[in-house]
Image (cartoon, grey):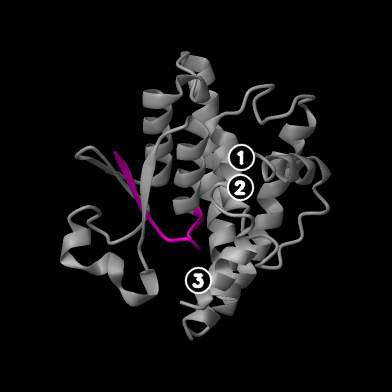
């Protein structure tokens, strides 16, 4: 059976859970409490040498890095989520990298400083927070414009892909972290629709609710 190691407040971890749900893969989820150092134990660092999540163990095959995991799960269980054509796959890879490297890094700075640092009683890095806010509103307009050019339901037309999963998870903390997405109308409609789908709901009803439960642990 597939095992997913992750943290409930980690967007990359939830990305993998979204993907496994979407692909219809039966899995066991094992929660790793990062603040308690559970990812830094010698045993866990054999799975991820940097002591991070997510990690999967697919019947003995261990893999880390969320985008690599999404591609692996798609190829193995739902190939249509990651097209095999050279140009089509290159476009998917392009947007996977854009979301993770730009939108994801900006959101991570905001989420850590507004949500996780206070939770862990760590000093907020105001410069990092300001950079996150600045870059978020620099890199969301290209996403909005790309969606605006499409008349279909998903990022690449009428069929969902791993880019949808990546972007949905990346933006999941938005409300809890005080990121206003309302200026991005197409993006907001796309996001609200996907949050009603079964693969999302099977993970959680909302990031805010999950954060509250995590804070109580």
Q: Quadrant of residue 67?
A: top left
Q: Nearer the viewer, mark 1 or mark 3?
A: 1
Q: Work out which quarter of the rendered image holds the C terminus and state it.
A: bottom left
Mark 2 lies on residue: 201
**Callout 2 secondary element:** helix
Q: Is residue 27 magenta?
A: no
* Residues at marks 1 and 2, CA–CA distance in whole angstroms: 5 Å
Q: Magenta segment range?
A: 1-11
* Residues at marks 1 and 3, CA–CA distance in whole angstroms: 22 Å
**Do residues under tags 1 and 2 come within 8 Å of each other at their CB atoms?**
yes
Mark 3 lies on residue: 214
Residue 124 rendering spot, x and y as whole percentages: 54, 81
Q: Work out which quarter of the rendered image holds the N terminus and state it.
A: top left
Instruction: State the count of labels.
Output: 3
Residue 129 rendering spot, x and y as whole percentages: 60, 71
Is residue 208 toward the left or the right of residue 80 in the image? right
């Amino acid at each position: 059976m597939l095992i997913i190691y992750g943290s409930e407040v980690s967007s990359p971890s939830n990305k993998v859970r979204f993907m496994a749900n979407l692909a219809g893969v039966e899995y066991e989820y094992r929660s790793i409490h990062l603040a308690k150092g559970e990812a830094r134990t010698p045993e866990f660092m054999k799975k991820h040498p940097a002591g991070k999540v997510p990690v999967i163990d697919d019947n003995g095959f261990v893999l880390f890095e969320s985008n690599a995991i999404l591609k692996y799960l798609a190829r193995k269980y739902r190939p249509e989520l990651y097209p095999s054509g050279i140009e089509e796959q290159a476009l998917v890879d392009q947007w996977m990298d854009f979301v993770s490297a730009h939108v994801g890094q900006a959101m991570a700075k905001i989420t850590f400083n507004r949500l996780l640092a206070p939770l862990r009683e760590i000093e907020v890095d105001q410069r990092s927070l300001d950079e996150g806010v600045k870059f978020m509103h620099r890199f969301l307009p290209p996403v909005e414009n790309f969606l605006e050019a499409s008349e279909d339901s998903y990022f690449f037309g009428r069929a969902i892909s791993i880019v949808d999963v990546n972007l949905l998870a990346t933006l999941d903390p938005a409300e809890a972290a005080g990121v206003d997405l309302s200026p991005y109308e197409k993006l907001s409609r796309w996001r609200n629709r996907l949050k009603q789908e079964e693969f999302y709901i099977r993970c959680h009803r909302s990031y805010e609710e999950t954060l509250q439960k995590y804070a109580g642990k």
